[in-house]
Image (tube, rainbow, N blue to C red):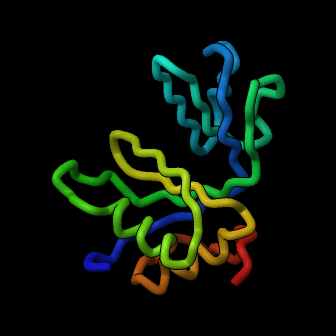
Amino acid sequence: MKRKLRLQLLDGEFAVCKLKNLRDAAWAGPFVSLTVTDEEISLVCPAERAPRDCPASETGWRCIKVAGPLDFSLVGILAELSAALAEKRISIFAVSTYNTDYLLVKAGRAGDAVAALKERGCEFAGDPVRRGVPG
């Protein structure tokens, strides 16, 4: 990686859900993302807050936050991070906000993801091992 990115593994597991309508959205948590298109409504939220009756849901995700805010002129942040994870065959679900980017990885691969990103020079705030990620 050309730049040293500061990352943070958020506590807990997350769910990626497809909703029937906006009334089902869970609005509280360290990270909640709602995406609405003409074809679907998707929600990412803490797993314990995921609606129980949504048509589709997948739990067991861990969330890595890029420390922000990031300037819109920066190029290749997600490309660099996703390339480091792709080399280790770690699948991601990426979400971008106005201020920063988030990468969700399956919980069973979170330790591998942290290690791969550290190998590329990324630093993690706090202690990912203490946050339930194997060293």
> Which quadrant of the rendered structure holds the C terminus?
bottom right
Give the side of residue 28 with respect to residue 96, left or right: right
Which image quarter: residue 19? Answer: top right
The number of numbered badges drawn on the structure is 0
Which image quarter: residue 3? Answer: bottom left
Image height check: is 107 above or below 72? Answer: below
> Which quadrant of the rendered structure holds the N terminus?
bottom left
Q: Residue 40, position in %: x, y?
A: 56, 23
Taking the view exactly as shown, the residue that stands out farthest to the left is 73
- At horizontal 75% and vertical 25% (from top left) the residue drawn is 55
- At horizontal 74% and vertical 43% (from top left) the residue drawn is 58
- At horizontal 58% and vertical 68% (from top left) the residue drawn is 90
Q: Residue 86, position in %: x, y?
A: 49, 71
Instruction: Give whichever of 114, 85 is nearer the camera.
Output: 85
Which image quarter: residue 23? Answer: top right
Image height check: is 95 above or below 112? Answer: above
Image height check: is 135 above or below 111? Answer: below
- At horizontal 48% and vertical 50% (from top left) the residue drawn is 94
Image height check: is 111 above or below 24? Answer: below
Q: Residue 75, position in %: x, y?
A: 22, 59
Taking the view exactly as shown, the residue that stands out farthest to the right is 52
Q: Residue 84, position in %: x, y?
A: 45, 75
Give the side of residue 129 with respect to residue 80, left or right: right
